[in-house]
Image (cartoon, grey):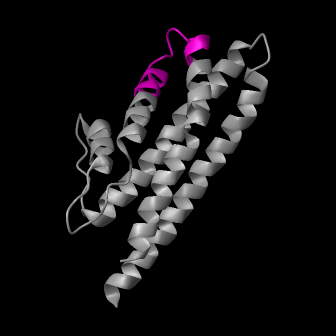
Amino acid sequence: MEAQKEITVFLAEFDFQIKQVLKVYSIIEEKKVVFDKEPVASEMVESTGYWLHNLYSAFEDLFKLTAGFWENNVKINGDFHINLLKRMLVHIEQLRPALISEESYRFLNELRGFRHVFRHAYSFGMDDERVSFLLHRVLEKKELLLQDMKKFRKTIAEI
């Protein structure tokens, strides 16, 4: 009974974090409407980059929640971000299913790389074409990612 209660709490926190992801997606969808109009001001490019950065951060918070609950530890070291993402790809026998598919992993790794560049772009600004490409790609991959999350949640809810 106690284990079921803990899983119920985990699923509530999981659902809350998915809502945060969806809020960021909503803002990104608004940015796309403006971004698709020519020309795009540098402030719009930077703002869009910021929200792309936030999207990965929202997913990473979901990954930390998942790893923290199921594996009961998240080691923070120099390789933390990539190791956490890789862990979400892994099915851990008798513990939890994989949270993301191979295709989602590849895309999220690309978005993770962008977030790293964004955090260190203060000296040279953002590349308009790269932000535009990633903006469209984020929206193209949205359903894939959400399907992975739904599949994971359904499996956990059946435990």
Q: Is residue 139 above or below residue 99?
A: above
Q: Is residue 151 above or below residue 52?
A: below
Q: Nearer the viewer, residue 138 or 122?
A: 138
Q: Which segment is the magenta one?
A: 113-130
Name which quarter of the figure residue 68 lies in.
Answer: bottom left
| Residue at 54% from the left image edge and 40% from the top image edge | 55
Q: Is residue 82 left or right of residue 13?
A: left
Q: Residue furthest bottom?
A: 1
Q: Is residue 47 above or below residue 9?
A: above
Image x and y of residue 37, in percent: 79, 17
| Residue at 51% from the left image edge and 71% from the top image edge | 12
Image x and y of residue 139, in percent: 61, 35
Q: Is residue 126 visible?
A: no
Q: Is residue 144 left or right of residue 74?
A: right
Q: How many marks?
A: 0
| Residue at 37% from the left image edge and 54% from the top image edge | 99
Q: Is residue 10 above or below residue 55?
A: below
Q: Is residue 117 visible?
A: yes
Is residue 126 one of those drawn in magenta?
yes
Is residue 156 one of those drawn in magenta?
no
Q: Residue furthest left?
A: 93
Image x and y of residue 1, in percent: 34, 91
Name which quarter of the figure residue 31 lies in.
Answer: top right
